[in-house]
Image (tube, grey):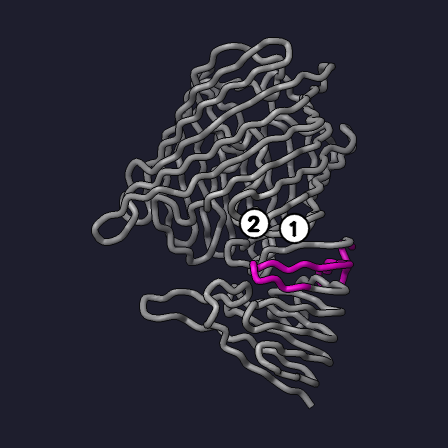
């Protein structure tokens, strides 16, 4: 005999698994369904045992867990399941599932799994001691499996990342990139959120991520997302302390294509301001201004090269929307200031600016054009933190045709009047999975992704 328990979770708007979406009128409630042989409900706690099925959400946000035993708190939206499995695939034989000895549901929209096995169909692809998954709506398209690939510099490689510590305040990640030609690259990155949440904003980013040039200017592909400029999802405020130990990290330099950088260690403080907005009379945002900055100290060495160099580095980026044309087109501007000093007495100063126009089309298609210029003075003994291109034009586009997604990135050097790099990718949606192949021309690199939709 089976027992069903249906709960409408709408009393806690910030609860982890209650996907409460605000409509034009009122609140759209999404039920939580628990099915098992034995269910004991003593509000706010629900206990279930015997072939437990736990479902929550609807459509692309629907999640299904199976377990031998489960306990769930309807007020905190937290729970624990033993001998459990998780999937977002609604087929009788799911395309993928994640099995674990224990799965914990946290109110901040994460699953914490212990002794994990990831299955594609009936085949176990990988076993992990632990895994943490963001199951909030913003995590659509999360990649759970290592990313394989091949490049002319590194040979065959795998790129993967493991969460060693994952709390609202603290995050410690192990990132590895074993290669056949360059050995094992990677290390440990840790950060603590002094103010704000380490899960809602990046508590650590590499210094290259705070430059004006972006490795991937394409926003995440989310079905039926309503875009509102200046920013659809502004980053929340954050103040964090971070540390990084990275060995033979791949650095992308024009003049030294085989460059590797080692950070032993790098420590610093990162800050993200709350977004200041100016709104129109109808309440729609007109201008959004946000500041990011960080200060760090580290010891670095490079290959090829030798010897450690210490560096103090301070940099900040101010970004704003200069004009918004409706809800899908925007003109953005960014300003960068950076000052670095080195153990040998060198100093390096950078002032930069970027102007970008972007448009979101129906169905998730996207296009942008970004003009970048730098004014540089001083010198640096480190190749990886030297800005090689003073004036650059960066273009990005994505076209969604049915279940297929095509994307292209172009980097044009305005000083040399030449195409510096280009990248293309093709993805095909297969129910709950989307395999993709990516080609990066400059490094003769091909890589493969398998995105899990519905996370």
**Residue 199 badge:** 2
Kind of element beneath mark 2: loop
Q: Is residue 359 left or right of residue 453?
A: left
- Crowding around mark 2 (Cα neighbors within 10 Å: few <14, some 14 to 19, many 20+) is some
> Toward the viewer: 368 or 386?
386
Specify the quadrant that holds the C terminus.
bottom right
Other residues around mark 1 within 10 Å, as few (<14) / some (14–19) / many (≥20)? some
Specify start and end residues of the magenta stretch as a single range.
104-127
Q: Residue at x 54, y 12 (%)?
A: 347
Residue 121 belongs to the span the image colors magenta: yes
Compared with residue 125, is residue 270 higher up or lower down, i.e. above or below? above
The residue where tag 1 is placed is: 166
Look at the magenta stretch and give its main secondary structure. Answer: strand
Check the picture and name the quadrant holding the N terminus: bottom right
Residue in the picture at 71% in, 73% down: 67
**Mark 1 vs 2, N-terminal side:** 1
**Are the residues tagged 1 and 2 within 8 Å (C-beta)?**
yes
Rendered residue at 68%/22% (across/down): 299
Q: Is residue 80 visible?
A: yes
Q: Nearer the viewer, residue 241 or 280?
A: 241
* Mark 1 → mark 2, Cα distance in angstroms: 8 Å
Measured as percent of width and height from the top left, residue 146 is found at 70, 46
Regarding residue 153, the answer to whether it shows in the image is no
Q: Position of residue 130 (x, y in %)?
A: 74, 54
In the picture shown, does residue 250 fall above or below 166?
A: above
The local secondary structure at tag 1 comes to strand
Quick one: 216 or 188, which is closer to the camera?
A: 188
- Residue at the front extreme of this rendering: 194
Q: Quadrant of residue 267?
A: top right
At a point 50% along the width and 28% down the height, the residue shown is 211
């Amino acid at each position: 005999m089976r027992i069903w328990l249906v709960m409408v979770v709408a009393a806690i708007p910030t609860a982890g698994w209650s996907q409460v979406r605000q409509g034009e009128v009122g609140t759209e409630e999404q039920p939580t369904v628990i099915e098992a042989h034995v269910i004991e409900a003593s509000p706010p706690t629900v206990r279930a045992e015997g072939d437990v099925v736990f479902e929550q959400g609807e459509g692309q946000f629907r999640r299904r867990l199976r377990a031998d035993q489960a306990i769930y708190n309807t007020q905190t939206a937290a729970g624990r399941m033993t001998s459990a499995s998780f999937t977002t695939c609604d087929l009788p034989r799911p395309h993928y599932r994640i099995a674990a000895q224990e799965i914990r549901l946290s109110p901040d929209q994460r699953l914490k799994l212990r002794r994990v096995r990831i299955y594609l169909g009936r085949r176990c692809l990988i076993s992990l001691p632990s895994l943490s998954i963001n199951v909030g709506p913003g995590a659509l398209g999360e990649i759970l499996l290592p990313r394989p690939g091949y490049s002319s510099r590194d040979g065959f490689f795998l790129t993967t990342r493991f969460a060693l510590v994952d709390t609202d305040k603290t995050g410690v990640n192990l990132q590895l990139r074993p290669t056949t030609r360059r050995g094992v690259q990677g290390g440990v990155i840790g950060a603590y959120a002094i103010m704000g949440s380490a899960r809602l904003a990046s508590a650590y980013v590499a210094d290259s991520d705070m430059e004006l040039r972006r490795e991937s200017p394409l926003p995440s592909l989310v079905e039926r997302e309503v875009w509102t400029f200046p920013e659809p999802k502004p980053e929340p405020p954050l103040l964090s302390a971070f540390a990084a130990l990275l060995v033979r990290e791949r650095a992308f330099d024009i003049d030294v294509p085989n460059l590797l950088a080692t950070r032993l260690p790098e420590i610093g403080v990162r800050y993200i301001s709350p977004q200041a907005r100016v709104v129109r009379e109808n309440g729609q945002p007109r201008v959004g201004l946000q500041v990011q900055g960080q200060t760090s100290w580290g010891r670095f060495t490079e290959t090829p090269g030798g010897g450690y160099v210490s560096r103090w580095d301070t940099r900040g980026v101010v970004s704003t929307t200069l004009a918004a044309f409706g809800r899908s087109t925007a003109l953005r501007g960014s300003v960068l200031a950076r000052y670095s000093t080195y153990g040998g007495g060198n100093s390096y100063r950078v002032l930069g600016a970027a102007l970008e126009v972007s448009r979101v089309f129906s169905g998730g298609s996207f296009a942008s054009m970004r003009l970048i210029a730098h004014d540089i003075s001083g010198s640096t003994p480190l190749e990886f933190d030297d800005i090689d291109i003073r004036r650059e034009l960066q273009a990005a586009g994505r076209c969604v045709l049915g279940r297929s997604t095509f994307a292209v990135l172009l980097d044009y050097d305005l000083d040399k009047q030449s195409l510096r790099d280009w990248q293309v990718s093709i993805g095909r949606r297969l129910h709950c999975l989307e395999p993709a192949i990516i080609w990066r021309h400059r490094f003769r690199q091909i890589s493969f992704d398998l995105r899990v939709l519905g996370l």
